[in-house]
Image (cartoon, grey):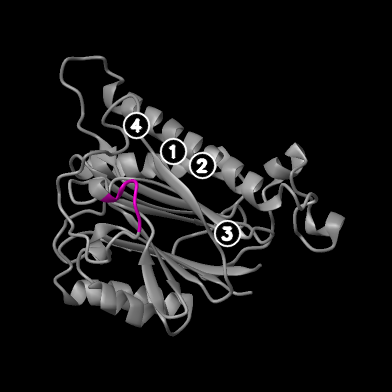
Amino acid sequence: MRFESWSKSDVGLVRESNQDHVGCFPDLGLYIVADGMGGHADGEIASGLAVDSLREAYDHEDDTQPGRTQTSTRPLSWLARLGLVRTPAATGSGRSASGSRSDAELARREVERLVSAVEEANRRIFERGHRDGGAVVRAMGTTVIAVVVHEWSRRLAWAHVGDSRLYRLRAGELMLLTADHTRFGEPYRDKRPVPLDLPHTNQLTSALGVAPNVGVEAGSTDLAGGDVYLLSSDGVSGLVPPEQLAEVMTRGTVAEIGEELLRRAMAKGGTDNASVVVLRVLA
């Protein structure tokens, strides 16, 4: 399968600084939105550390800049070294060398690796906020939604903490794949589907960096040609209603989808930093 992606973060119309960070690294198959909190500087530091830490966990080779349309080109080398997948040159198809292990085993390992990377990001942010060792520490934290997908994959792995969201549009039907770490999201932690009208709230029950350990919500979903995935901070999903998300995601390029979602968030007042990553499955 092949993919195209686009990402952008906007300060909005009210906030003085942007505490969001996005990561769009198609060569790594890695896509991230992080929404920082804890004061202007500390929130920006926390979300930046989340993106940097996740990127380092996967590779150091991609120089993608936000706001560019990208098509992913290569699989991760770590799975090839495990012997679970061969490169397209080795197999001629880009699919797993072992049909019996290809989907379930690769998805399980991908989810585990992504969870470990998010846990490491939590550790770094927490240590940064507590590094002076004094009684008064910096209230530094961030949400995160991260996905990993490859051209030889038939599943997308995701992990999240907080209330940044992952949506999937398939055959005109929008689905919310993540349940926010809030009192509204908790009832859906172990059941699906998550309602599209799940309310937003500023009262998170979990975030990266606020404690030495964090519970990471994670999973995987199958892929189909034409799927559109949206990673967003609450500056978009909290302002643009689900029916409008679905409407916008059904048409245009990934860049046009992303720009229109940001435009609609600004039209609703732009009361928060607004960030999106748009990912489309081409075939």
- What residue did someone put label 2 on? 114
What crowding class fits label 3: few (fewer than 14 Cα within 10 Å), some (14-19), or many (20 or more)? many
Question: In terms of depth relative to the viewer, which is nearer, 184 or 206?
Answer: 184
- What residue did someone put label 4 on? 214
Q: Residue at x 23, y 72 (%)?
A: 240
**Place of residue 38 in the rendered image (x, y in percent of width and height, measured from the top left):** 19, 39
What crowding class fits label 2: few (fewer than 14 Cα within 10 Å), some (14-19), or many (20 or more)? many
Considering the numbered disc 3 on the image, is that residue within a helix, a strand or a loop? loop
Q: Is residue 281 above or below residue 166?
A: below
- Of label 2 and label 4, which has the lower sequence position? 2
Q: Name the side, left or right, on which 210 lies relative to 125.
A: left
Q: Residue at x 20, y 32 (%)?
A: 139
Q: CA distance from mark 3 to mark 1?
A: 18 Å
- Of label 3 and label 4, which has the lower sequence position? 3
Q: Tell me which amino acid carries mark 3.
A: Pro
**Place of residue 165 in the rendered image (x, y in percent of width and height, measured from the top left):** 33, 57
Is any part of residue 69 visible from this angle? yes
- What residue did someone put label 1 on? 118
What crowding class fits label 1: few (fewer than 14 Cα within 10 Å), some (14-19), or many (20 or more)? many
Q: Tell me which amino acid carries mark 2.
A: Leu
Q: CA distance from mark 2 to mark 4?
A: 14 Å
Q: Tell me which amino acid carries mark 1.
A: Val
Q: CA distance from mark 1 to mark 4?
A: 9 Å
Marks 2/1 in contact by CB < 8 Å: the verdict is yes
- Toward the bottom, the furthest residue is 251
Q: CA distance from mark 3 to mark 4?
A: 27 Å
Q: CA distance from mark 2 to mark 3?
A: 16 Å
Region rendered in magenta: 188-192
Give residue 248's quadrant in the image: bottom left
**Place of residue 234 in the rendered image (x, y in percent of width and height, measured from the top left):** 25, 58
Residue 26: give its label.
Answer: 3
